[in-house]
Structure formats: structure tokens, C-alpha cells
Amino acid sequence: MAHRVAALVFDGLDPFELGIVVELFGLPRPELDVPWWYELAVCAQDRAPARAMGGFTIEPSQGLDAVAAADTVIVPGCPPLERPFPEPVLDALRTAHAGGARVVSICSGVFLLAAAGLVDGRRATTHWRFVETLRERYPGVDLDAGALYVDDGEILTSAGSAAGLDLCLHIVRRDHGTAIANDVARRLVIAPHRAGDQAQLVERPVAPPDDRRLRQAMDWALGRLAEPTTLADLAHHAFMSPRTFTRRFGEAVGQSPMAWFLRQRVDASLALLEETDRSVEEIAAAVGFSSAAAYRKQFRHRHGLSPTAYRRSRRASPRRVVQRGPVPFARLLGHAH
DNA sequence: TAGATGTTCCGCCATT
DNA sequence: CTAATGGCGGAACATC
């Protein structure tokens, strides 16, 4: 069974945002272990070609029928503001929504949803440039101007282009779980250039989980990275049994608790390798490994080279600001979700 | 190198 | 009735 995704395009659409949709929903992913995946159709009324920003044209493969019949409709941003939307387009959107489809917008795409009356009295967001206009035109919308994206059930809206990517990943997470979403993200976010093999992929940092007890345990663990810590300890600080903790952690984070924790330790060591001259032995101890051997093994496993080789590669090109390791989870914990 | 010992993690299932 | 919980056991892996 395939899940039908329809992307609605217009003159003036932002091809980057359409690209996000194509990348996430329009490509086969045979490498993923999932029972079903998405089938994308790029749609416009009468399949009329749409001029994209940047001066080229997109030829839709489907008309509005595909929109009405879709399981998920996505509206990428388009500077809509002056013209009214064609009634058939709005109808197709309403039909899809009434039939239980999810309706998603990126950036200024909300205007179309609003025009169709789908976001009245609902929470939504958009790019900050459009906040004022949206407020004036559709005062009934409960606008959350600060959010990256808003998930209001079957209506999902997002802010600027990159937030659209976050929202699409969020949808994949909803549909297939966190582990698969992380997998997809890992394939999208390719490492900055590095000589040699494909080591050192930058993994997308996981969003902090909703469950406060989980965050609490993670916070606690991060605050004492170097101390000996067991699964039972973590579970205890989350006020759960080890079994339940393991289960909930996996659902929320997409990794097992100890795999996550080991990773945090290795991540923490990156800064020490880059910014200090302490020995590998010392660093291993400083981030909580019981032996340098264990540290080396973990490090090679995650980064494909030895700690010393990693340090050397950083020193060799100190000005390459673009290159950086994974964002430590700690920095994300403070963020709103 | 081999082997004994410990830990994690996940499917299964009774219980809440 | 369904959903969540947590104990148990064993495979996989790590450690000594």
C-alpha cells in the first residue's frame, strides 16, 4: 500500500521548498525497512505549467483529481498575496480534507489553507515575513509566530524553507517512528566534504522528547557524563522501570538508552580533541570511558577514524568553519519543541 | 586466545 | 475491551 502525497504548485513557487517535498516523499527508499512508503504527485489545476522562482518551469504530472484523492496534500510556499485563489483549487483542498487527508503547508502555503477555510480557529504558523498579513486577512487563525512548525492533527504548517524540512521529517516520524526518521535525515544531511571514504556523516540531532521524565533523565545523565552510569540509573531518574524506560526511550529518541548515552560521551570528546592537547587516555577518562581501548573502539565505530587521526584532520584545516561535528544534545534540551 | 562474567535490549506475556 | 506496564529469559555484545 502506498500513501499518496500531492504537492500543489503555482506560478511563483519556491523550487527549494518543492524540492524538500520531492526529496522526502518523492524518492524510492528501498533501503528502509518500512511496510509502506510515499507516492508523490506534483499537481496543478489542469496540469498547467508553473513558473518557479529562478526562472524555469515545472510541468505537473497530475491535476486536481490527485489532490482531492490524496492522503496528504502539501502546499509549498508561493507568493500568493495579490490574487485570489481559483475556486477549483480550494475545492480540491476541501475535498481532500473532508476525506480525512492531512493538509500541510510550507512558508506562505498557509494562505491557501486559510483561503479554503481549513485553519480557522486552529493553530498554525508561517514565515515571519507573512505573519502580519496573515493576521490581518485571517484573524480567525490561532497564529503561533514563533514556532518552526505546528502540528495540529491533520493540519500541519511550517515557517521558512528549512522549517519545511523539519516538518516533513516530523511527518515521517509520525508515520514511521523516530528511528526511520533519523535514518532519512542521515541520508539527507550529507557530511561536509572530507577526503577518503564516507566516514563522518553529520547526524541530525534528535529533537528533545515530549515526555518530561525522559528529558529529566537525559539532563541528569548529561550533567554527569563522566560518572559510571547504568541503564537502571537512567530509568530510576525517569521514575520508570528499566523495561518501560527502554521502551519509551526508543519510541521518543529512536535509539536505545545506552546507545544514546555512549554517543553523548563520544560527542563530548570531540571538543576536547579539537581544543585541547590532552592525551587520548585522559580524554577517554574525562568523558566517562572506563578504558582508552573502549573509547577508541566507540570512536572509530562512530566516526570511522581514530581519535588521534580526527584531531590531526582538524588541526590541518583550522579555518574550515563549515566543518563541525554533531551538535551536542545538551544544547538542544533548552529549546522549545 | 579463550573463557567466564556482566550488561543491554527486546520479544513475550501476565497484570494493572 | 484496549492500552500501558514491568518481570522474565535469552541473544548479542562488552569486559575482564
Image (cartoon, coloured by chain):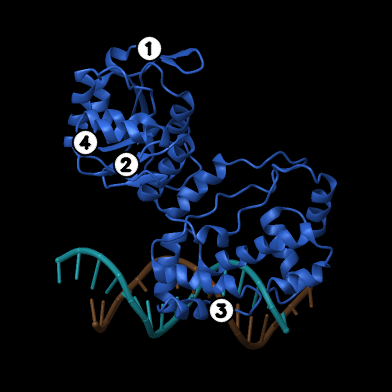
Chain colours: A blue, B brown, C cyan
Secondary structure category for the residue under label 2: strand
Using a 10 Å C-alpha cutoff, classify the residue at mark 4 as few (fewer than 14 neighbours), some (14 to 19) or many (20 or more): some
Report which residue position mark 3 lands on. Answer: A230
Q: CA distance from mark 3 to mark 1?
A: 59 Å
> Same subunit under labels 2 and 3?
yes
Secondary structure category for the residue under label 3: loop
Q: As displayed, is residue A57 above or below residue A273?
A: above
Chain letter belonging to callout 3: A
Q: Earlier in the sequence, mark 3 or mark 1?
A: 1
Q: CA distance from mark 2 to mark 3?
A: 39 Å
Q: Of the residues shown, which amino acid type is indicated by label 1?
A: Pro
Residue A129 seen by the camera: yes
Q: Earlier in the sequence, mark 4 or mark 1?
A: 1
Q: Of the residues shown, which amino acid type is indicated by label 2?
A: Leu
Secondary structure category for the residue under label 1: loop
Q: Which numbered tag is attached to residue A190?
A: none
Residue drawn at 27 percent across, 25 percent down: A66
Chain letter belonging to callout 4: A
Q: Nearer the viewer, mark 3 or mark 4?
A: 4
Residue A321 point in image, percent of width and height: 72, 43
Report which residue position mark 1 lands on. Answer: A49
Chain letter belonging to callout 2: A
Q: Earlier in the sequence, mark 4 or mark 2?
A: 4
Using a 10 Å C-alpha cutoff, classify the residue at mark 2 as few (fewer than 14 neighbours), some (14 to 19) or many (20 or more): many
Q: Earlier in the sequence, mark 1 or mark 2?
A: 1
Report which residue position mark 4 lands on. Answer: A118
Mark 3–mark 1 contact, CB under 8 Å?
A: no
Using a 10 Å C-alpha cutoff, classify the residue at mark 3 as few (fewer than 14 neighbours), some (14 to 19) or many (20 or more): few
Residue drawn at 61 percent across, 64 percent down: A264
